[in-house]
Amino acid sequence: MPPPSIDVPSGPHSVEAFVRGYENDRLLRGFRCPKCGTLTATWGLACSRCGTAPLEEATLNGRGTIVAGTIVQVASDEFVNDAPYAYVLVELEGGGRLSGWIPQVRDAAEIAPGTPVRFAPSYKPGVQFERVLPSSTTASER
Ligand SMILES: [Zn+2]
């Protein structure tokens, strides 16, 4: 007896395209629901709000604010030169929420909820952010 067929919606997107997007294309990729407009940074086949499929690919805003975070003191090999660093959850302006990291963070006050951040494309793994400090320039603006 053959296995039951499952009707899985297809989409043009892939996890690989996500990774390539933020590591090579310097874009934060996400998805927009064509029916209700919900934006999400999470790879998926259907809208988490209304169930519509497929979703459309979208470029997310690279600016957002920290929702939560923690400081990592002991790092794996690939992050050892950046420790201590912060692992943060970021709510993007316009929609989408994703996790990423900020190198060289020593004090939890630096990653307090509400702290503005922006996507800081890097050759390093993961989605790297940098804090947006008022009245100072950052590496990407110099
Ligand atoms: Zn929807």
Image (spheres, rainbow, N blue to C red):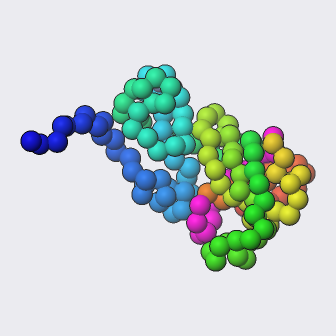
Q: In the drawing, does residue 137 fall left or right of residue 66?
A: right
**Res 76 quadrant in image:** bottom right
* 35 within the magenta span: no
User: Is 33 on the left-hand or right-hand side of 107?
Assistant: left
Q: Position of residue 132 (x, y in %)?
A: 80, 51
Asked whether residue 108 is in view, the answer is: yes
The residue closer to the viewer here, 58 or 36, is 36
Q: Is residue 116 left or right of residue 21?
A: right
Residue 75 vs 16, above or below: the answer is below
Q: Looking at the image, can residue 139 be seen?
A: no
Residue 37 at what x, y percent from top left?
51, 26
Q: Residue at x 43, y 41 (%)?
A: 44
Q: Identify the residue shown where x is 84% and y is 47%.
A: 112
Q: Is residue 111 above or below residue 5?
A: below
Q: In the rendering, at what x and y percent does residue 12 appear?
A: 34, 45
Q: Quadrant of the C terminus?
A: bottom right
Magenta stretch in the rendered image:
114-126
The residue that appears at 53% across and 28% down in the rendered structure is 38
For the stretch drawn in magenta, the main secondary structure is loop
Q: Nearer the viewer, residue 27 or 16?
A: 16
Position of the N terminus, as image quadrant, is: top left
